[in-house]
Each structure stands twice: as structure tokens, then as C-alpha cells.
Image: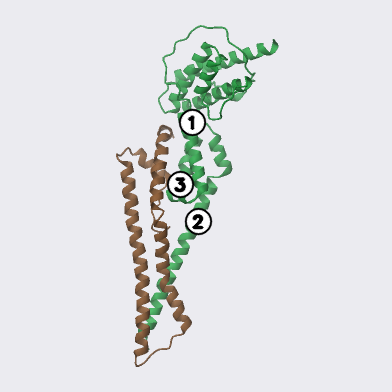
Chain colours: A brown, B green
Amino acid sequence: MLPMLDLNIRDLIDLMETECKNVEDRIQKMYQWDFNRTKLICQLSIGISASFLVLIGTSYVQNFTSTKPVTVDSNLLIVSLFLSICPAIFGIFQFYRLKSIHRQYVAALKLLHKLRAIRPFITYYRQTF
Amino acid sequence: MDISFLWTTLVFSGIAGIISIISFTISILTTYKLQREKIKNAQNSAFDEAIESDNIKILGSFLEKNIGNFSVFEYVSNSEVSSKVDMYIEKIQKFVSNGNDFAPTNRKMKDQTNVLDKYPIISPDSENNFDTFDDGETWNTLARLRRNIEVRLKKIADFNHIEIKKENTAGYLLILLKRKELISEKVFSDLRYCISICNNAVHGSDVPISQANEVISIANRVFKELDLVAKTHEKV
């Protein structure tokens, strides 16, 4: 989804064809970087939601103690509370997807291994066409 | 107009919520749509055509343009994608490694005229004629030749009720038929030479046109001999 690493099979082929050393280590670094980035986005989303919830709570209490309180419809308040937790839901969903990152890393290595077996074919194809 | 702190907070939290809902929905729909498109492109007729093909251009192009577009995430999360990708890579893998039983050999021809036993008659058709190279595509021609040798050997094995597996390579079949004394030493050495050169070409080694032509003419001669023997047996 949005911030996750979108490494496709052609990228793996290109990586293999560059003949750089330690391709596996590079893939690991890419996934490590992606893991850190997605984790940061999850934390930010949850943080934003928490901030809004605190702000709504604070302003609601302040409104009661104010000399000139404003009237807010309770339905509107509920909708606002729901909307303020939406970034957290997005963050939690990303966090859930983050769980699959180790499977993606293993799958990338597996695919790389398979692609290496057909490397002569790929090299010949790319040189010829 | 006095806008209270509560109202401001509600408006901003609403905006943040709506933005996250919109971005979340768009990202899910886009991902889903893209994934469906990629699966559709890599599906059915095009996939079947590519997987049945011996043409390096078709095989390579499908790998680069369709299979290559799948992301690792799609490979992990969608079983349809993973099975297609695995099947396709295995097809090419089998093609590249097929018949590795024979390393390139220095050929020694032994004259041995009598050819043994029974062979099925395979009527000559366009598939069996390897007279020309298409635009110098040695790979395609020798890959087809190797497939053709494999088909011929499988037919001989079937004809003689020898149990073989679908994944048995041309090289394996040749050794098997030799052990069963269904082919002569000469046919064995000729076809072994042909398969080893075909393997070289398929593995991307440079095979000179002259050598490819030589291999094709040897294979054609062996095929004719096998057909002749089969016809002789049929008459008897």
C-alpha cells in the first residue's frame, strides 16, 4: 500500500544483472529501510490520532468551564471523534501489513535464487532483443 | 465572530480523518485495480501461449513485460500470482537446465549401420524440418530441435511400452533407450552430440552457425533413419 516497498520481479532481475556483490545484503537493507519508514508512519498516524483525541477532550472540558460556552451537537462530536481515530486505523493497518515484511524478504530471496537459475536465458534475451 | 477552541479542534480532526479515509480508500482501490490488471495481462491465452512456446522472444518478452511486473508483495499475498510466477520461472528453468546430462563432447563417430528394433513412424511435417534459421536466432532453432528430439525419443519409448515421466529430459531418454538397446550406438552418439550443442545454445554459449547447421543436418538424418527403420518393421 502507500508507503510500503514496491519491489517487483523486474527489479530483482535488474539487480541480478548488475553483477554487484552481496545482492542479498542490498535487498535486506532495502527491506530494513522500508520497515523503519513504515514503522515511523504507523507511529505518526497513531500519534496524530492521539493528539486530536486529547485536543478534543481538553477543548470539551475547557468549553464547560468557559464563561461563554458554545453548543455542540453530540452527533457532531461523535463524528469528530470517529474521524480523529481514522489516522490511527490507517496506522494500525499499516502496522499489520508490516508483519508480512519478513515473508516478503524471504520471498524476494527465493525469487532471486530462482531467477539466478535462468540467468543465462535472461542475459541472452537482453543481449539479443 | 467568536470561533471557540472546541470548534477549531473538531474541524481540524475532521479534516485529518477525512484525508486519511480518502488516501486509505484510494490506495486500496488502486492497489487492487493494478493487481487485477497485472493478473489479467498474465492470464490464460497469453500465458498458455508463452508457456508452450520455445521462442526466446516470446518467453523473454512475457517474463519482462508481464511476470516482471508482479511485486514481491503480490507474490506473497496472492496465491494466483505466486503459482503463475513459479510455473513460468520453472518452465524457463526446465528449458535452460533441460538435458544437462550431456556436457559438450568431442564427437567420435563410429560406423555402425544396423539400427535396432521398433520405432513409430512419424510422418514428416513442418515442425520436424529444421532447415533454416529465422534471423539468425540460433537459440530458437536449437531449442526447437532439442524439443523435437525429446518428442521423438518419448514416442519411441511409448511405442515400446517403456514407462517414462513427463519431466524426463531428452538426455535421460536417450540414455534410457540406449540401455534398453532400442537405439544403436551411432544414433546414440549422433543425438548425444546434437543435444549437447543444443544445450550449449540454450545456455547462452555462442554456437557458430556452421555448427548449428551441422547439428540440424545430423538430426534430420537420424530422424530419417528412424522413420526408415519404422517403415521397414511395419512392412515386415
Q: Answer above or below: position of B64 versus B16.
A: above
Q: What chain does badge 3 belong to?
A: B
Residue type, numbered disc 3: Asn
Q: Nearer the viewer, mark 3 or mark 2?
A: 2
Q: Which residue is mark 1?
A: B95
Query: Same chain for the residues at labels 3 and 2, yes or no?
Result: yes
Q: Quadrant of residue A121?
A: top left
Q: Residue at x 42, y 44 (%)?
A: A9
Q: Quadrant of the C terminus of chain A?
A: top left
Q: Quadrant of residue B181?
A: top right
**Residue A109 position within the rendered picture, expressed as x and y whole percent measured from the top left:** 38, 43
Numbered tag placed on residue B69 in the rendering: 3
* N-term mark: 3 or 2: 2
Residue closest to the eye, A18 or A117: A117
Query: Same chain for the residues at labels 1 and 2, yes or no?
Result: yes
Q: Which residue is mark 2?
A: B32
Q: Quadrant of the N terminus of chain A?
A: bottom left
**Residue A99 position within the rendered picture, expressed as x and y whole percent measured from the top left:** 40, 56
Q: Answer above or below: position of A87 versus B100.
A: below
SS at mark 3 in the image: helix
Q: Nearer the viewer, mark 3 or mark 1?
A: 1
Q: Residue at x 58, y 23 (%)?
A: B154
